[in-house]
Amino acid sequence: MPTKIEKDSVTGQMTTGHEWDGLKELNRPLPKWWIYIFYATIVWALVWFVLYPSIPGLHGYFHGTTGYSQRSAVDQDVAAVTKQRSAYMDRVKALSFDAIRKDPQLLAVAQTAGKIAFANNCQPCHGAGGGGNPGYPALAAGNWIWGGTLEDIQQTVTFGVRSGLDAARNGQMPRFGVDGMLKPEEIGQVAAYVMTLYGKPGGNTVAGEKLFAENCAACHGEKGEGKREVGAPRLAGRAHLYGDDEATVVAQIKNPRLGMMPNWNARLDEATIKSVALYVHALGGGE
Amino acid sequence: MLLAAASRGQRVAKIGQAERVRQLEAEEAGDHLFANRVRVYPKSVKGPVRRFKWGVLIFCLTLYYALPWLRWSRGPGQPTQAILLSIWHERFYFFNLEFWPQDIYYLTGLLIMGAVALFLVTSLAGRVWCGYTCPQTVWTDLFMWVERILEGDRNERMKRDAASMCFDTVWRKSLKHAAWVFIAFWTGGAWIMYYVDAPTVTVEFWTGTASTEVYFFTFLFTATTYLLAGWAREQVCTYMCPWPRFQSAMLDEQSFTVTYQAWRGEPRTRGKRANSAGGDCVDCGACVTACPTGIDIRDGIQLECINCGLCIDACNHVMARTGRPGWLITWDTLADQASKAAGTHTPFRFLRPRTIIYLTALIVAAGVMTTALALRPGIGLSVQHDRAPLFVRLANGDLRNGYTVKIVNKAWTPANFVLTTPGLARAALTEAERTQTAASQLELVVEADSVGTFRVFVTGQPAGATDGSQPVDFHLRNTATGEQTVYHSVFMSPTNGAKP
């Protein structure tokens, strides 16, 4: 309790009246300018409450008289950026690949857009720079299953692989083991023969060669060179989608893994897909 | 230096002590943390030193204002300005030399040379840089000249400032500031011309089409010139500039500095005439009133002294009028002064350990710079291996690595280059999206005065590469000039390497 408010003889200030074992406290109020600014901020806050979304309710919230929304602000920003980019992207959409490649500036823009779109959408499976992963083809190496021209790439990206669309790359391979089309020992013989196609030493491959010609050559080719029309991968090369050891080859014949790729036309616009095609084509495998 | 100053005797050291005590008392009484600024009204002087200083001033200003207008032919498409620091185009031009951002280390060399040269000159002749060629001194001198023309000399200006405002004072001061701003603007404008083509920017400036940066920096340097040369003046030298604080490390007893010959001048004989028992100094204060930093040179070498020597002219004038020999204040060394006080003479020693060290450092720096400049390559190569994928395996079993190759062509004409990787067995190079067939060498064209960026694929089957990586050298050759350069990179392969 304040006991005795008095004037301090040294400073000329009034004390607060509190005393602790002889120690007294000077009364030094906050500066006026500080107080007024504090009041002004309170007024400012009230104005803010009215103008902007502020008070939460059980079903929604008070939107404020200005109706400001961060979501719509983002939408506006995105629309503005899209409009800004449309100067180039409209041309990417309208022009043929040949025409785009003849315009170095447009090509640079498209490849940059493609690089960003690739990093956001394709990289998780196909790897940075299109290096590929087991089950996900390496795009930089030129081991194309469905073709490596710009148009082929655009088609694959647009409709996907086994994505459920009729226009998709719908290659199929019979389940030779699961469906009982080949006996387990026959599968082993075919696998041994297939491995000789890429230089792995095999045992007796005469039976396997015969079985391959009867069952596999129609799609994969007589020498295992593959057939792009049906998406049958080349077997005779050194690059493999799932692996080149015996267990992997046997497993693939027995119950093929048929990887799928989404149709990106549901998510990316045509100009972006063409940009991605231009970027992927330039990774080193383009035809 | 301090020791030397003390050795000149208690008598000299005490000169001006009363004034210093008075200043300190005033500061304490005023409860100030900083010394109050004492306005300096330098009195104009005439004499050889002043004439020399005018000469240096005119030379420096002419150089500064005229240099941007000097033209230099470099061939079509190249800037025609002799000295141009084109930040926008990332090129510095000095007559026939062109510097790229990569060459910025030459600036380091230049700064080192500048610093060492400053040390050398200071150890020889004191702070002549401060007194004659420092921009702060040059422009302050110019501004004081304008002030003197419009407001009169020291006494008139002091009277004017002490009196109340009248019409005469107002128009003179207004005109003075207008003239200052005009000179400052001229200075700021000339500064910009070192960074953009002078005739072009002049037209653009007055037609309102110059860039915001041009206007900003012109007015920024106008403002700094006006403030530093018009208002701050000696405060810059005394408080802002670090140079006075460490000049004592360069000076020694053999440095040729502006010196009051105390052995001749003391004791001062105010009011008395020649043939009296006193020294030559008549304590008229002419040296103090002439000083642009407002100090008393008779206190010896001090922090504020910029070694301009205007006090010499002022004193010579008084000595002549009182019929005494001139050069009571002169250029001399502390060592010689000590000798002269004892009736002998110490000749000036140009070669001393410190000057030899500075001179050697200067020669070495200049030699290294010149050699580096002479051997500067006209081409450059940088090869960056792809971070991902490190390699790809092709259907035929070959491995392929991707690289980003940057080729610098400093020539003012396009250049043809050949890129090879001789160390890599059966290596084949392709440029992405351009060359169809792999070849052992790649022909690349780089535009004039630019950097060409290329995506290059190297296909190889590294024999016995079991550690996942092997070094590979990229050789670049200019087919026209034969100039070559090499960049060390790596060729990546699977770590187990056993896979065929």
Image (spheres, rainbow, N blue to C red):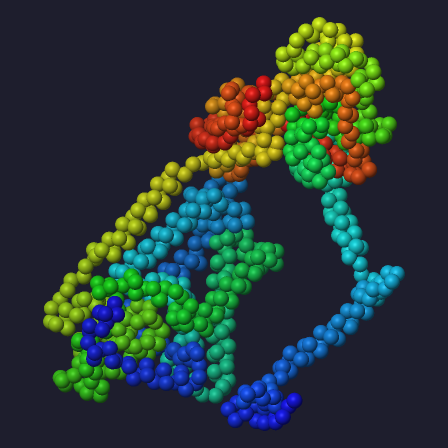
Q: Is residue A217 above or below residue A138?
A: above
Q: Position of residue A237 (x, y in %)?
A: 66, 17
Q: Is residue B169 left or right of residue B121?
A: right
Q: Is residue B53 left or right of residue A68?
A: left
Q: Quadrant of the N terminus of chain B?
A: bottom left
Q: Is residue A67 left or right of residue B356?
A: right
Q: Residue furthest top?
A: A206
Q: Residue at x 21, y 78 (%)?
A: B10
Q: Position of residue B457 (x, y in %)?
A: 58, 27
Q: For residue B368, what is the image quadrant?
A: top left
Q: Is residue B247 above or below residue A245?
A: below
Q: Is residue A68 above or below residue B92?
A: below
Q: Residue furthest left?
A: B343
Q: Position of residue B101 (x, y in %)?
A: 49, 45
Q: Residue at x 48, y 23 (%)?
A: B422
Q: Residue at x 69, y 32 (%)?
A: A126
Comparing B100 with A18, the one in front is A18
Q: Quadrant of the C terminus of chain B?
A: top right
The answer to whether residue B56 shows anywhere in this view is no
Q: Position of residue A81 (x, y in %)?
A: 74, 48
Q: Residue at x 42, y 68 (%)?
A: B240
